Image (cartoon, helix red, strand yellow):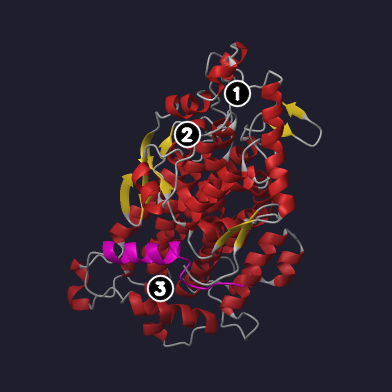
Amino acid sequence: MTEADPVVFGTQHLRIEDLLAVAERRAPTRLQADPAFREGIAKGAAFLDTLLDREGVIYGVTTGYGDSCVVPVPLHQVEALPRHLYTFHGCGLGRLLDAPSTRAVLGARLRSLTHGMSGVRVELLERLHAFIEHDVLPLIPEEGSVGASGDLTPLSYVAAALSGEREVFHRGVRRNAAEVHRELGWTPLVLRPKEALALMNGTAVMTGLACLAFARAEYLLQLATRITALNVVALEGNPEHFDARLFAAKPHPGQAQVAAWLRSDLAIEAPAAPLHRLQDRYSIRCAPHVLGVLADSLGLLRQFIETELNSANDNPIIDAENERVLHGGHFYGGHIAFAMDSLKNLVGNVADLLDRQLALLVDQRYNHGLPSNLSGAPAATAMINHGFKAVQIGASAWTAEALKNTLPASVFSRSTECHNQDKVSMGTIAARDALRSLELAEQVAAATLLAANQGVWLRCRERAAPLPPRLADMHHALREDFAPVIEDRALEAELRLCLERIRTRHWGLYA
């Protein structure tokens, strides 16, 4: 972990970037510890205890769960109820969340509980924070949530791990949770009434994944802009398509920002070269308009995600100050579902834009004098070399899958749990879909970036014209890892390296 300002879990607002730093282990973490904060948390748990002493009716504490809320639980069974909740929800399937995703989930759940409106003890917050601090990661299957009542099944793995049950990933090894507790000198928690429900009945999985998706989409936007600039050079495009006066006439801020980035990359304030044509094809000319929709949507997506991240989103809400138990539906992940369904659409369009640019690059009918399939082979072996032909086919396949994935998950609400959960958000499925769409779009970006760099190399070899400074720096950085394709070679390893560079945001692009 690198030195950075700590991310504090408490009353302060967390940004997506804060949770990303936690997920990527780039910042230390602290749990707010001032007396007022601790007293506020403790007050909720104490209020619940007084209700139990008065034999009050509290959903999930003195009643069964969901449709079973009409079933009273006698006081002598109340202590056993939390363990039953996380036990019967231990039925997740699918792949396990990776380490960054799991850390994001733990951080999102901890932030929700620090509102002091969930009726949990300070000790539970301390242990959940200790999991983050010591990188004890519950093994969470990614499938099994309908997004209301929150992420019950995946979050049951967090509740169980805090109780010393199931498995965790710690120090690079998959281990029994009880063993890790013993090694760290911890006593597994015995969850008190409402604590299992507070851990599980919320939107932490979809919200944690949404934060990761947002960060990847933000970088993809900038990378797609830089790739477009390289392709303008490779295709000898018309840079006047990005003139500031043009975008003043249609002033969407994000669209104008993309055009400004392209102008800075292409240094078009310098004297322009003679134009080969008035208008480029749409995947070049309209790139700011396509990418601008994503750029202009990021603000709204951030608002939805960060509001959810900084909310108390379980049920019931415990208002200890006014001694009220508020039964509602804050576990419903509709805002995250909408944000992630929207992001899938936006990302699919970015993949499609880059795929169309790649199709222009490899086709001699449209690439304005570049070799077929961008092959750098000399004339003697040109007929047996195929350059980026298969890469373009692969990019087309990845794009098609990303576009297929744009079907919104949120419209597929299912009635579950004896029609108690009869309208659900599907937010977690939408978030997982968005991450898959990003994975595919990043693959298209990797393919198009390597092809664009090959095109620039071929164009410079042909004309020996200097590149604009920013593109010259990018071209040089890429050449360090990716040599020009002269004779055919298998490019899988290079594509995978390029993907690794993209996912670690290796290239600084725009401020």
Q: Distance between the residues labelled 1 and 2?
A: 15 Å
Count numbered badges in the picture.
Answer: 3
Q: Residue 60 carries which label?
A: 1
Residue 433 shown left or right of residue 249 in the figure = left
Report the magenta residues as a range.
492-511
Residue 486, position as x, y percentages in the image? 25, 75
N-term mark: 1 or 2: 1
N-term mark: 1 or 3: 1
Q: Which residue is drawn at 32% across and 59% down?
A: 391
Q: Nearer the viewer, mark 3 or mark 2?
A: 2
Q: Quadrant of the C terminus?
A: bottom right
Residue 509 is covered by the magenta coloring: yes
Query: Front-most of 57 and 242?
Result: 57
Q: Nearer the viewer, mark 1 or mark 2?
A: 1
> Which image quarter: residue 63?
top right
Residue 503, position as x, y percentages in the image? 44, 61
Residue 59, position as x, y percentages in the image? 64, 22
Secondary element at tag 3: helix
Q: Name the residue under label 3.
A: 453
Q: Residue at x 65, y 30 (%)?
A: 315
Query: Front-most of 170 and 124?
Result: 124
Type of the residue with mark 2 = Ser
Residue 332, position as x, y percentages in the image? 63, 32
